[in-house]
Image (tube, rainbow, N blue to C red):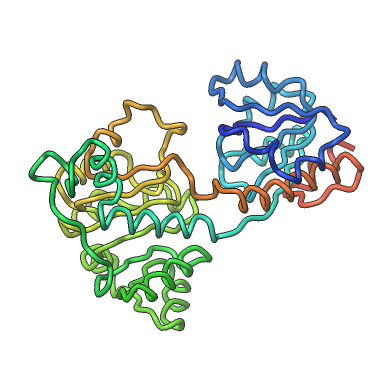
Amino acid sequence: MKIAILDDYQDAVRQLDCFSLLDGHEVRVFNNSTRGLGQLAIRLAPFDALVLIRERTAFTRALLAKLPNLKLLSQTGKVSGHVDVAAATELGVAIAEGVGSPVAPAELTWTLIMAASRRIVPYATNLKEGLWQTASINPALNGVGRVLRGRTLAIWGYGKIGRLIAGYGKAFGMQVLVWGSEASRAAATADGYHAAPSRAAFFEQADVLSLHLRLVDATRGLVTADDLARMKPDALFVNTSRAELVAENALEEALKRGQPGQAALDVFTSEPLAADAPLLKIPTVLATPHLGYVERDSYALYFRAAFENVVNFADGKPTGILNPDALRRDA
């Protein structure tokens, strides 16, 4: 089969042991992204199978219709709104889903919480410029950091990642407050944490607030400007899930008003994020380039499953197929 691996920004996939699973196939690895429909169609037209790195490229009906040779999309992890599943099924393109782990994104979330709370990045950057214990040359931004013990960690979403974050917060002596569905709040209470009495109280009481929700139609724009306006002036807002969970421009405007006082972000509405993006110009934002799952152990897990699905499909024994009707249509 002709196979393409998309959006491998760091050219990391070829270094994985599991890459050898594709021996015997014609494989092309793309290290940069292409966004235009026409450019994408030209680039991807020759391939029978595409291996997708999470949601880095969206597969719309219009794009899928321009890929007549495509038989398989092998997803690292689960499909999350970036593939038009109905269109793929109608066009006979099978979608194979893989596996994932909450560990790396949870650890990155906690790293961001720690780094932002103690202002590690500006201190370290300024030290290299000869500035000792200086977070900013702007006096208004040059305050000291703070510890987490005794403060309130607010978690919206008590799934696999949310549970890990709650455990980290407990280990650091924080008061854990959970909001989400009734089932999420009940599960958190059963685990010994507190469920927020209301959505308003959840935002008002948070010293650190972290989102851990899937992006679906019901959660798009779920966090509003009114929610953010309830946060403390010294609170930290953390988002390592999906940028689209927050209403458009609401966070930028809230940070400019000073409520919340800081944000730590790993996800953005447009990725890769442009160097002149407004968020990067806000001094109270700590931003990382969507590193939640980007580490060696996670890559080994994600890509082994994705490559096994490709090989099994090529051998006529498809596995992990999200849309089995596509196989029947192709037959």
- Nearer to me, 197 or 159: 159
Q: Quadrant of residue 71?
A: top right
Q: Horizontal and vertical percent for residue 328?
A: 86, 42
Residue 168 vs residue 201: left or right? right
Identify the residue shown where x is 38% and y is 51%.
239
Q: Quadrant of the N terminus?
A: top right
Q: Quadrant of the C terminus?
A: top right
Q: Quadrant of residue 180?
A: bottom left
Whether 255 is drawn above or below 177: the answer is above
Identify the residue shown where x is 41% and y is 83%.
192
Q: Horizontal and vertical percent for residue 201?
A: 24, 69
Identify the residue shown where x is 41% and y is 39%.
268
Q: Horizontal and vertical percent for residue 54?
A: 59, 43
Whether 99 is drawn above or below 310: the answer is below
Identify the residue shown where x is 43% and y is 33%.
270
Q: Does residue 233 appear in this view?
A: yes
